[in-house]
Image: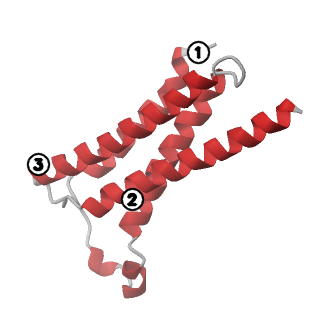
Amino acid sequence: MFKKQSLIPAVLWGFFILYLTLKPKSGDDSLLPDWFKELHPDKIAHFGFWCLWYVIFHSTYLKYISFSTNSIIRWNRQRVFMVVAIIIGGMIELLQLKLNWGRSAEWLDLFADSSGVFSAFLYFVWRDNLIHKKNAF
Protein backbone atom coordinates (compact mmCIF):
# COMPACT_ATOMS: atom_id res chain seq x y z
CA MET A 1 0.00 0.00 0.00
CA PHE A 2 0.98 3.67 -0.06
CA LYS A 3 3.54 4.98 2.42
CA LYS A 4 3.61 8.69 3.20
CA GLN A 5 7.41 8.65 3.27
CA SER A 6 7.50 7.60 -0.37
CA LEU A 7 6.81 11.18 -1.53
CA ILE A 8 9.64 12.73 0.50
CA PRO A 9 12.43 12.21 -2.09
CA ALA A 10 10.33 13.71 -4.91
CA VAL A 11 9.29 16.69 -2.75
CA LEU A 12 12.91 17.31 -1.70
CA TRP A 13 14.08 17.15 -5.31
CA GLY A 14 11.31 19.58 -6.26
CA PHE A 15 12.52 22.06 -3.63
CA PHE A 16 16.09 21.58 -4.86
CA ILE A 17 14.94 22.48 -8.38
CA LEU A 18 13.12 25.54 -7.00
CA TYR A 19 16.26 26.64 -5.19
CA LEU A 20 18.49 26.23 -8.25
CA THR A 21 16.12 27.99 -10.62
CA LEU A 22 15.14 30.90 -8.36
CA LYS A 23 18.41 31.70 -6.58
CA PRO A 24 20.11 34.88 -7.74
CA LYS A 25 22.47 34.21 -10.62
CA SER A 26 26.15 34.18 -9.77
CA GLY A 27 29.21 33.35 -11.79
CA ASP A 28 30.55 34.42 -15.11
CA ASP A 29 29.61 32.52 -18.25
CA SER A 30 32.54 34.05 -20.10
CA LEU A 31 34.80 31.42 -18.51
CA LEU A 32 33.07 28.68 -20.48
CA PRO A 33 34.63 27.68 -23.79
CA ASP A 34 32.69 28.71 -26.90
CA TRP A 35 32.03 25.13 -28.00
CA PHE A 36 30.42 24.38 -24.61
CA LYS A 37 28.08 27.37 -24.91
CA GLU A 38 26.86 26.03 -28.26
CA LEU A 39 25.59 22.90 -26.48
CA HIS A 40 23.16 25.03 -24.42
CA PRO A 41 24.12 23.45 -21.06
CA ASP A 42 21.28 25.33 -19.37
CA LYS A 43 18.66 23.53 -21.48
CA ILE A 44 20.38 20.17 -20.97
CA ALA A 45 20.35 20.79 -17.21
CA HIS A 46 16.65 21.71 -17.28
CA PHE A 47 15.83 18.56 -19.23
CA GLY A 48 17.93 16.37 -16.94
CA PHE A 49 16.72 17.79 -13.63
CA TRP A 50 13.06 17.54 -14.58
CA CYS A 51 13.47 14.08 -16.10
CA LEU A 52 15.16 12.95 -12.88
CA TRP A 53 12.34 14.51 -10.85
CA TYR A 54 9.81 12.31 -12.64
CA VAL A 55 12.08 9.26 -12.25
CA ILE A 56 12.32 9.90 -8.50
CA PHE A 57 8.55 10.33 -8.24
CA HIS A 58 7.89 7.18 -10.21
CA SER A 59 10.53 5.10 -8.44
CA THR A 60 9.60 6.08 -4.90
CA TYR A 61 5.86 6.70 -4.99
CA LEU A 62 4.30 4.71 -7.81
CA LYS A 63 6.10 1.48 -6.96
CA TYR A 64 3.62 0.99 -4.10
CA ILE A 65 0.68 0.75 -6.51
CA SER A 66 0.28 -2.72 -7.97
CA PHE A 67 -0.29 -3.23 -11.69
CA SER A 68 -3.34 -5.46 -11.54
CA THR A 69 -5.71 -3.86 -9.06
CA ASN A 70 -4.89 -0.19 -9.40
CA SER A 71 -3.75 0.35 -12.97
CA ILE A 72 -6.22 3.20 -13.51
CA ILE A 73 -5.08 4.92 -10.31
CA ARG A 74 -1.44 4.44 -11.33
CA TRP A 75 -2.06 5.87 -14.82
CA ASN A 76 -3.96 8.87 -13.44
CA ARG A 77 -1.25 9.66 -10.88
CA GLN A 78 1.40 9.53 -13.59
CA ARG A 79 -0.53 12.00 -15.72
CA VAL A 80 -1.37 14.27 -12.78
CA PHE A 81 2.26 14.48 -11.68
CA MET A 82 3.36 15.18 -15.26
CA VAL A 83 0.88 18.06 -15.60
CA VAL A 84 1.70 19.45 -12.14
CA ALA A 85 5.44 19.37 -12.89
CA ILE A 86 4.91 21.26 -16.16
CA ILE A 87 2.72 23.84 -14.40
CA ILE A 88 5.41 24.31 -11.75
CA GLY A 89 7.95 24.83 -14.54
CA GLY A 90 5.76 27.58 -16.01
CA MET A 91 5.31 29.19 -12.61
CA ILE A 92 9.09 29.21 -12.10
CA GLU A 93 9.59 30.99 -15.41
CA LEU A 94 6.97 33.58 -14.44
CA LEU A 95 8.64 34.07 -11.05
CA GLN A 96 12.00 34.55 -12.74
CA LEU A 97 10.41 37.24 -14.89
CA LYS A 98 8.79 39.04 -11.95
CA LEU A 99 11.49 38.68 -9.26
CA ASN A 100 14.27 40.12 -11.41
CA TRP A 101 17.09 38.38 -9.48
CA GLY A 102 19.39 38.18 -12.47
CA ARG A 103 17.53 35.23 -13.91
CA SER A 104 15.83 35.46 -17.26
CA ALA A 105 12.51 33.82 -18.01
CA GLU A 106 12.93 31.73 -21.14
CA TRP A 107 10.15 29.72 -22.64
CA LEU A 108 12.77 27.32 -24.01
CA ASP A 109 13.51 26.44 -20.38
CA LEU A 110 9.87 25.49 -19.93
CA PHE A 111 10.06 23.44 -23.12
CA ALA A 112 13.17 21.65 -21.79
CA ASP A 113 11.42 21.02 -18.44
CA SER A 114 8.34 19.67 -20.18
CA SER A 115 10.43 17.53 -22.53
CA GLY A 116 12.29 16.00 -19.58
CA VAL A 117 9.12 15.14 -17.70
CA PHE A 118 7.37 13.86 -20.82
CA SER A 119 10.37 11.72 -21.86
CA ALA A 120 10.51 10.06 -18.45
CA PHE A 121 6.74 9.58 -18.51
CA LEU A 122 6.89 7.89 -21.92
CA TYR A 123 9.77 5.69 -20.82
CA PHE A 124 7.85 4.43 -17.78
CA VAL A 125 4.65 3.90 -19.76
CA TRP A 126 6.64 1.82 -22.25
CA ARG A 127 8.47 -0.08 -19.48
CA ASP A 128 5.33 -0.70 -17.45
CA ASN A 129 3.55 -2.04 -20.54
CA LEU A 130 6.44 -4.43 -21.16
CA ILE A 131 6.35 -5.64 -17.55
CA HIS A 132 2.57 -6.01 -17.62
CA LYS A 133 2.70 -8.02 -20.87
CA LYS A 134 5.50 -10.18 -19.51
CA ASN A 135 3.51 -10.93 -16.32
CA ALA A 136 0.38 -11.74 -18.34
CA PHE A 137 1.96 -14.83 -19.90
For this view, does 8 lie left or right of residue 38? right
Residue 21 in percent (x, y) is at 29, 51
Nearest-to-viewer mark from 3 and 2: 2
Q: Amino acid at mark 2?
A: Ala
The residue carrying mark 3 is 99
Q: Earlier in the sequence, mark 1 or mark 3?
A: 1
Real-space Cα separation, disc 1 to disc 3, in angstroms: 38 Å
The residue carrying mark 2 is 112
Q: Amino acid at mark 3?
A: Leu
Residue 33 in percent (x, y) is at 38, 84
The residue carrying mark 1 is 2
Label 2 environment density (alpha carbons within 10 Å; few <14, some 14–19, many ≥20): many
Residue 91 in percent (x, y) is at 23, 43
Residue at (39% x, 53% y) in the render: 113
Q: Earlier in the sequence, mark 1 or mark 2?
A: 1
Label 3 environment density (alpha carbons within 10 Å; few <14, some 14–19, many ≥20): few
- Image position of 68 with respect to 78: above or below: above
Real-space Cα separation, disc 1 to disc 2, in angstroms: 31 Å
Q: Amino acid at mark 1?
A: Phe
Q: Quadrant of residue 47?
A: bottom left
For this view, does 30 lie left or right of residue 74? left
